[in-house]
Image: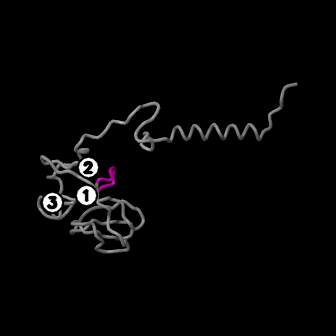
Amino acid sequence: MGKVTSRRAVLTAAAGAAGSALAAGCGGNGDENGGVTEETGPAPSEPPGGRALVATSEIPVGGGKVFEGEKVVVTQPEEGTFKAFSAVCTHQGCTVAGVEGGTINCACHGSKFRVADASVAAGPARRPLPQRQITVESGSIRLH
């Protein structure tokens, strides 16, 4: 008679296989490992000036625009001056909803941040939005 495998051994092996498959399937695009995966090789690098985000003409003076996918908000506090900040509210991590009335506004709990420097204009947030690096060139704003 052959070896009898216990139900516990079968379930343990199945759970291990499922975990391995989940880890492989949820590995993202390889960014956790510097953009390199066995399947794809090195991730394409960004152009030296960063990735094009928006035309300067699309950012209103005294206002701004939220880019949810990039988790960034770009503002133009005065004509020709562009700033970029994280779009993740420092209160509880919501993505800010928009820019209006000279502030970057979070709809979750009402925090407001000034367009010029992302300092807190109204709480409950206590810390400013972190600055993000951009380059403005030839009418285009590039995110780094």
Q: Kindly identify the amino acid type of the residue bearing the numbered disc 2.
A: Leu
Q: Which residues are magenta?
A: 67-73
Residue occupying image coordinates x 32% and y 58%: 86
Tag 2: Cα neighbours inside 10 Å, few (<14), some, or many (≥20)? many
- Tag 2 near tag 1, CB within 8 Å: yes
In the picture, residue 16 is in which quadrant? Answer: top right
Location of mark 1 (residue): 84
Please rate how many residues cluster around mark 3, counting C-alpha atoms within 10 Å: few if below 14, some from 14 to 19, many from 20: few
Q: Indicate how the structure is coloured in the image.
A: one colour
Name above or below for residue 55 compared with residue 124: above
Residue drawn at point x = 38 percent, y = 74 percent: 124
Most foreground residue, 32 or 5 = 32
Q: Disc 2 or 1, which lies upstream in sequence? A: 1
Badge 1 vs badge 3, beta-carbon distance below 8 Å: no
Q: Is residue 21 magenta?
A: no
- Residue 72 position, x and y percent, is 30, 55
Give the mark, 3 or 2, whose residue is nearer the N terminus: 3
Give the distance between the C-alpha atoms of the residues marked 2 and 1, in whole angstroms. 9 Å
**Residue under numbered circle 3:** 81
Q: Residue 133, image x and y in percent?
A: 26, 54
**Residue lying farthest to the right in this orientation:** 1
- Cβ–Cβ below 8 Å for labels 3 and 2? no
Q: Magenta stretch containing residue 71, yes or no? A: yes
Name which residue type carries label 3: Thr
> Label for residue 143?
2
Horizontal side of 38 relative to 95 (left or right) equals: right
Task: Identify the secondary structure beneath mark 1.
Answer: strand
Q: Amino acid at mark 1?
A: Ala
View extreme (top): residue: 1
Q: Residue at x 83, y 29 (%)?
A: 3
